[in-house]
């Protein structure tokens, strides 16, 4: 008979592959002291006001009726299986919360028997926590693809955030690795949750009290590097999901090789595409907060992100006709496009220049990455001869002077091009 502690070890470890709320990188194991950053079970997420809250992150079960080649819980994988009961998850959550270990719950699951059978148990857990235990902590619930709208609707009344994983970015890739699944079973619940939120927002204009429904919104996750999709393919589907379902976040999870029996997958021992994952997040940020259009960063002629430099610098190097811009007169939106200047610094520049023209020492004090931005801007005491500036020389200079933590993992063949 497997104990609750053993179940927790198995199901917390199985949940670590979901990155939609996680902190990663720690590998320090307990060797007789206190704590163990290599163990899974508690992850962190951030609230809208910037607070970091810790979550109990577990699966309800790692039994699964599907055989997705990229998933550690796939039906054919020979691993130890376990499943919590509804009451066990509720008791674990409440006991951990009372001991001040956690402030919320991140709950996902493999699918046993059917989508509705699993979703019904997930719904009972969150309902019991809210109505019987009076738990007001944060709850992030993974929706089960193919579950009925009635169960999703009821669960949405008790959770803060819902999410459902798209897994592989394209339908063709998904059919290749998980032929029993399709993208429609992900799109439908996302559409349903979004329509419910819109309907309740409309009702709130007429009725004083309406129920809270998924107040922290919904998100999805894609696996990157398991199939041959280009970065353009990935960001196209990401943009479509943001636009169509009002997602709060799309997460990009670099594929960690776990399966040598499928020839098309990267084999065990291959490095996860962490740098590519990071560039995709940077692109996602530029699209949502820096007003870039997708076709400016990626398009049919430029389908892969440059791994050597960040997407904004890459765009600037390909578009020298926009630069240099005069930092003392350019619009806020144009300052945002300068490599090395973030949103906060751009706002400070716009405010500071009301009191006089900005010089180099003032820009450095504002906090911009001056050694990068200086190639793309003019300021009150700039002396550069812009007519002689070549972007390939700018690129070499920035790369040679850079100290990116990713330099060590860049392929040597790529570095040799700029030596």
Image (tube, helix red, strand yellow):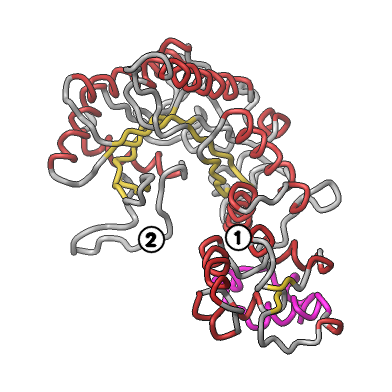
- Mark number displayed over residue 275: 1
Residue 1 position within the rendered picture, expressed as x and y whole percent measured from the top left: 21, 28
Return the residue nearer the eye: 411 or 387. 387
Q: Tell me the element at label 1.
A: helix
Return the residue nearer the eye: 24 or 377. 377
Q: Nearer the viewer, mark 1 or mark 2?
A: 1
Q: Measured along the vertical axis of the image, is residue 253 above or below residue 168?
A: below
Residue 383 position within the rendered picture, expressed as x and y whole percent measured from the top left: 73, 89
Q: Residue at x 37, y 19 (%)?
A: 155
Residue 410 position within the rendered picture, expressed as x and y whole percent measured from the top left: 65, 68
Q: Tell me the element at label 2.
A: loop
Does the magenta run of residues contain 345? no
- The boundaries of the magenta stretch are 390-419
Q: Is residue 21 left or right of residue 419?
A: left
What is the C-alpha distance between the residues marked 1 and 2?
17 Å
- Mark number displayed over residue 231: none
| Quarter of the view holding residue 134 | top left
What secondary structure characterizes most of the magenta part?
helix
Q: Residue at x 58, y 28 (%)?
A: 245
For disc 2, the marked residue is 26
Return the residue nearer the eye: 419 or 336. 336
């Amino acid at each position: 008979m497997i104990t609750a502690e053993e179940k927790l070890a198995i199901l917390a470890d199985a949940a670590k592959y979901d990155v939609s709320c996680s902190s990663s990188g720690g590998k320090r194991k307990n060797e007789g002291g206190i704590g163990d950053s290599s163990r899974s079970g508690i992850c962190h997420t951030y609230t809208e006001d910037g607070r970091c809250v810790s979550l109990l992150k577990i699966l309800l079960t790692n039994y699964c009726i599907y055989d997705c080649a990229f998933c550690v819980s796939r039906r054919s994988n020979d691993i130890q299986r376990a499943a919590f009961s509804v009451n066990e998850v509720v008791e674990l959550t409440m006991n951990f919360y009372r001991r001040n270990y956690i402030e919320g719950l991140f709950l996902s699951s493999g699918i046993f028997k059917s989508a509705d059978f699993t979703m019904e148990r997930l719904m009972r857990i969150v309902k019991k926590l809210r109505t019987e235990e009076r738990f007001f902590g944060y709850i992030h619930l993974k929706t089960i693809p193919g579950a009925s709208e009635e169960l999703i609707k009821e669960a949405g009344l008790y959770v803060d955030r819902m999410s459902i994983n798209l897994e592989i970015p394209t339908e063709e890739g998904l059919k290749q690795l998980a032929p029993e699944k399709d993208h429609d079973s992900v799109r439908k619940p996302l559409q349903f949750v979004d329509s419910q939120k819109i309907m309740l927002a409309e009702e709130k204009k007429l009725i004083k009290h309406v129920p809270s429904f998924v107040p922290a919104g919904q998100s999805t996750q894609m696996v990157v590097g398991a199939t041959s999709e280009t970065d353009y393919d990935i960001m196209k589907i990401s943009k479509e999901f943001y636009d169509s379902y009002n997602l709060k976040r799309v997460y990009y999870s670099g594929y960690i090789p776990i399966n040598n029996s499928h020839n098309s997958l990267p084999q065990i021992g291959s490095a996860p595409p962490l740098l590519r994952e990071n560039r995709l997040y940077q692109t996602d940020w530029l699209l949502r907060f820096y007003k870039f259009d997708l076709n400016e960063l990626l398009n049919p002629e430029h389908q892969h992100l440059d791994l050597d430099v960040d997407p904004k610098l890459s765009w600037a190097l390909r578009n020298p006709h926009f630069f240099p811009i005069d930092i003392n007169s350019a619009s806020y939106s144009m300052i945002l496009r300068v490599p090395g200047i973030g949103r906060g610094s751009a706002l400070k520049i716009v405010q500071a220049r009301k009191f006089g023209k900005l010089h180099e020492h003032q820009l450095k004090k504002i906090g911009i990455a001056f050694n990068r931005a200086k190639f793309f801007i003019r300021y009150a005491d700039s002396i550069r001869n812009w007519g002689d500036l070549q972007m390939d020389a700018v690129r070499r200079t920035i790369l040679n002077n850079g100290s990116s933590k990713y330099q060590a993992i860049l392929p040597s063949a790529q570095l040799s091009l700029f030596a």
